[in-house]
Amino acid sequence: MAAIKAGDRVRVIAREVTSEDSKSGLYYSYFGGLTGSVDRIYDDGSVCVDVDLDSLSDEIRSRHLAMQETEQQRWLASLSDEVRNRLTAEQRQLKMSYRILVSKNDLEPLKSDKPRGSAKDQHAKNADSSSDSPKGSKASSPSAEPSQSSTEQHAAQPTKPKPPKKEEPPKRLSEADLAAAEEAFLRSRLQRS
């Protein structure tokens, strides 16, 4: 299996639920067949997937959209009239994502018809192909401007991008860590009152 990284399109493999799944909570029967993109990969082998709403069953999708609508109305009601009136129609929209946590062993990469590579890569390819155009003929003509010094030429040439630093994947908090953080938050709220 190819290594999965953040941003990759994936599909959750459909399989039977095991007793190990009920202990870990990383697989449920309705996960099978869902598609989406990888959001984060954790050290313990679990992967957060941002699920495409189109791949959800009708029942789950309608419930998700109903919750999204309810939250949007609650959020808009909490704003003052002045702030609400300043919002554009686009800003008034609330889009809730549907994310699941699964084992990386339950994922398969989706083959896409689109070429892999970002817009930056495509722009770089176009720039490289345009650099093959006959620019050298201008410089050798007698009416051309005087040539640049070697330091100016060196500064004008694009530098090679540095390889990205390898980031550590975010650490998944344990139940004890979450309980301690919640306790500290509640204590701070009590002290303010």
Image (cartoon, rainbow, N blue to C red):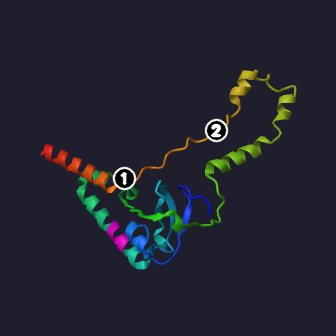
Image coords of residue 20 (percent x, y): 42, 70
Which region of the structure is painted magenta? 63-68
**Nearest the eye: 57 or 95:** 57
What mark, if any, has residue 130 been given in the picture?
none
Most distant residue in the left direction: 193
Label 1 element class: loop
For image coordinates 76% across by 46% down, the residue present is 129
For image coordinates 44% across by 49% down, the residue present is 170
Label 2 element class: loop
Question: Dividing the picture into quarters, in which one does residue 192 lie?
Answer: top left
Type of the residue with mark 1: Leu
Please, is residue 54 above or below residue 40 in the view? Answer: below
Q: Which residue is mark 2?
A: 161
> Is mark 2 in CB contact (under 8 Å) with mark 1?
no
What mark, if any, has residue 173 been given in the picture?
1
For image coordinates 26% across by 50% down, the residue present is 180
Image coords of residue 60 (percent x, y): 39, 75
* CA–CA distance in space, label 2 to label 1: 34 Å
